[in-house]
Amino acid sequence: MTILTEGDNSLFLTAPAMIVDTDIDTASWAAAHILDNPNYKWILARYVEADNANDNGQYWTYEDLKLARPSIQYSPMNVDHHPTEIVGSWVNSEMMLPNDTVLNPYIEVLGAFWERYFPETLERVQAAYESGTLAVSMECISESVTCGHCEKEFSYAGPFSPTYCEHIQNRSAHRQLNKPNFLAGALIMPGNRPGWSKADVKDISKRSSDDEKNRLIESIAAAHPSGSPKDWEDIMWGIQMQYLRERTNGV
């Protein structure tokens, strides 16, 4: 599942991520791009789905995502969307097609974290990964927006704009983002609280059993008995939006 945050001018698509080693399953497309280099730590994430409107009402076509996918390659990897805290690069991506367990196409990305230069940041990344809370958030803009209700097309002016129709502005229809472009990708580390309850946790750590994942969720619930899954989601996005505001204000 992908969670979307709306910034002032761009969209931030956030999904679970995992750290992978050089002995990754050779059947994986990413295996061909992973170098046996002690200076890199590899990050793999599945983050945007085609032909299916998400919970925030955004929609991307398969053809548009297929054309936009190359814009991910060589884009910067930063931490929490801080443009001055660049810790790596997104080296490649792949369009994954539907199979027995996945209904819609989606893009998966592979990034190289510069381990030798940022060992302290890597410790935070590793801790987030081991607790099942490491996520990747890709920044996206588009050329235009089409309303799913009236089917009118508008020049892109940010997630919401007075130039858009009332259906988009009041969220009564989904927005199709045409000809998207990916600008950067951030590692999101929200501490020891989950960012959302419905995320596909099997992609966070394939070494964990279902029982271990359930115990992790139960332990968090026990530590925060008054917090519902919606509360946890709000906590993560509150943290992320704080970072976005700081970036906008030049903090």
Image: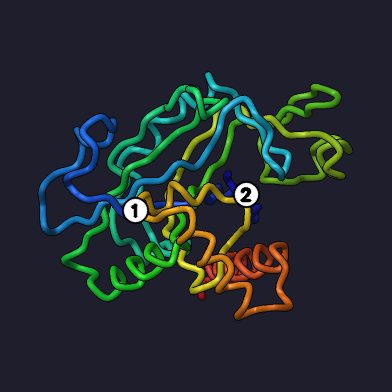
Give the left or right position of residue 150, taking residue 240 as reference: right
Identify the residue at horizontal 62%, vertical 49% (top origin). Answer: 4
Which quadrant of the view contains residue 86? Answer: bottom left
The image's mark for residue 25 is none
Q: Which residue is nearer to you in this view: 84 or 126?
A: 126
Sequence-first tag of 2 and 1: 2
The image shows residue 183 at horizontal and vertical percentages of 45, 45
Q: Mark 2 highlights which residue?
A: 4
The kind of residue tagged 1 is Arg
- Observer-side mark, 2 or 1, equals 1
In the image, residue 102 above or below residue 243? above
Identify the residue at horizontal 14%, vertical 59% (top origin). Answer: 39
The image shows residue 220 at horizontal and vertical percentages of 57, 73
Mark 1 crowdedness (10 Å alpha carbons): few <14, some 14-19, many ≥20: few
The image shows residue 203 at horizontal and vertical percentages of 43, 47
Q: Which residue is nearer to you in this view: 171 or 222?
A: 222
In the image, residue 242 above or below residue 107? below
What sort of colour scheme is used for the picture? Answer: rainbow
Helix, strand, or loop for circle 2? strand
The image shows residue 94 at horizontal and vertical percentages of 37, 30
Identify the residue at horizontal 63%, vertical 72% (top origin). Answer: 221
Helix, strand, or loop for circle 1? loop
Mark 2 crowdedness (10 Å alpha carbons): few <14, some 14-19, many ≥20: many
Q: Mark 1 highlights which residue?
A: 207
Tell me if residue 249 can be seen.
Answer: no
Identify the residue at horizontal 10%, vertical 52% (top origin). Answer: 37
The kind of residue tagged 2 is Leu
Task: Give the Cα distance between marks 2 and 1.
Answer: 27 Å
In the image, residue 250 above or below residue 132? below
